[in-house]
Amino acid sequence: MSEASYKLDKEIETVFSHLHDHQDVKKGLEFLEADQAQTLKEQIELAEISAPPFAETNRALAYKKKLEELGLEEVKQDAEGNVYGILKGERSSPALFVSAHIDSVFSIDTDVTVTEKDGIYFGAGITDDARGLAALLSIVRAFKHTGIKPEADIIFGGTVGEEGPGDLRGVKAFFKENQEVDGFISIDAVSPSAIVYKGTGSYRYEITYTGSGGHSFGAFGTPSAVHAAWACNFTHCRP
Ligand SMILES: [Zn+2]
């Protein structure tokens, strides 16, 4: 998705501009830039802990420790494996859940060592979603640094099972357990300049196709096996 094709509707744009012009928010955004070195350090640290779907425990526990150290309240790991804590607001509702996913697509035997060459960092899963996890920590620090107290509780955390066979099991379990939570933001680092909002949900199927395409955002426009799967499901192959 190019930035040029990206449009906000009026309602969202008004809120966004209002927030963006707020002095405390400006201070927070400046902090995020100043916090880049720490964010990168934690991004590398988290990327170097293997976290394939269904084996995210080590990274989840390391992340939980970081959430605790940032002073979030009621930090916990739930039965599914998600870890999260609360930044208390003036009141408990409408509550917002801000998350990044703990798992990566790489199997347990993948070398997850991060290397650097000419200022570029290389590593399995270092972007998706170690960057999201690290960015989330930086946002919590920005809240603490600026002293912004949210109107209502914000729950910050990492979810398990986002990728492939994980089938969003972490997010599904979170909302089953926390039905009073009103909003959800996922920080996923495929395209840092884009915000996808008012999502329409998704259906998940277990079908195997092969094709030349890649990631649905990062390789957008390349012929993809997903097109065949879609066509099959909605036309002649429908069961
Ligand atoms: Zn992702």
Image (tube, rainbow, N blue to C red):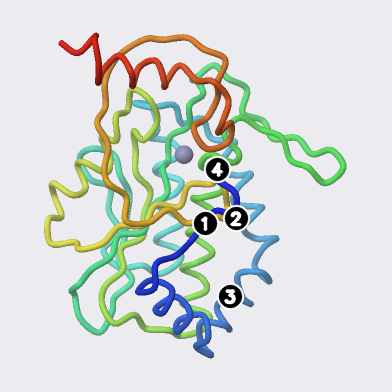
Which of the marked residues, 2 or 3, is nearer the chain's N terminus?
Answer: 2
Q: Is residue 238 left or right of residue 155?
A: left
In whole angstroms, how far apart are the C-alphas of marks 1 and 2? 5 Å
Residue 88 position within the rendered picture, expressed as x and y whole percent measured from the top left = 29, 75
Residue ID for mark 4: 190
Quarter of the figure that contains the C terminus: top left
Q: What residue is rendered at 35% in x and 74% in y?
A: 11
Circle 3 or circle 1, nearest the eye: 1
Q: Amino acid at mark 4?
A: Val
Q: Report whether the residue tagged 4 is closer than 8 Å to ligand 1.
A: yes
Residue ID for mark 3: 29
In whole angstroms, how far apart are the C-alphas of marks 3 and 1? 21 Å
Q: Report whether the residue tagged 3 is closer than 8 Å to ligand 1.
A: no
Say if mark 1 contacts mark 2, CB within 8 Å: yes
In whole angstroms, how far apart are the C-alphas of marks 4 and 2? 14 Å
Residue 94 position within the rendered picture, expressed as x and y whole percent measured from the top left = 20, 72
Circle 3 or circle 4, nearest the eye: 4
Q: Residues within 10 Å of mark 3 (few under 14, many from 20)?
A: some
Q: Is residue 51 above or below residue 6?
A: above
As helix, strand or loop, the secondary structure at mark 3 comes to helix
Q: What residue is rendered at 13% in x and 46% in y?
A: 176
Residue ID for mark 2: 3
Q: Is residue 1 above or below residue 214?
A: below
Which of the marked residues, 3 or 4, is nearer the chain's N terminus?
Answer: 3
Q: What residue is rendered at 29% in x and 35% in y?
A: 168
Say if mark 3 contacts mark 4, CB within 8 Å: no
Q: Amino acid at mark 3?
A: Leu
- Where residue 208 sits, quadrant-wise, is top left
Residue 44 position within the rendered picture, expressed as x and y whole percent measured from the top left = 64, 44
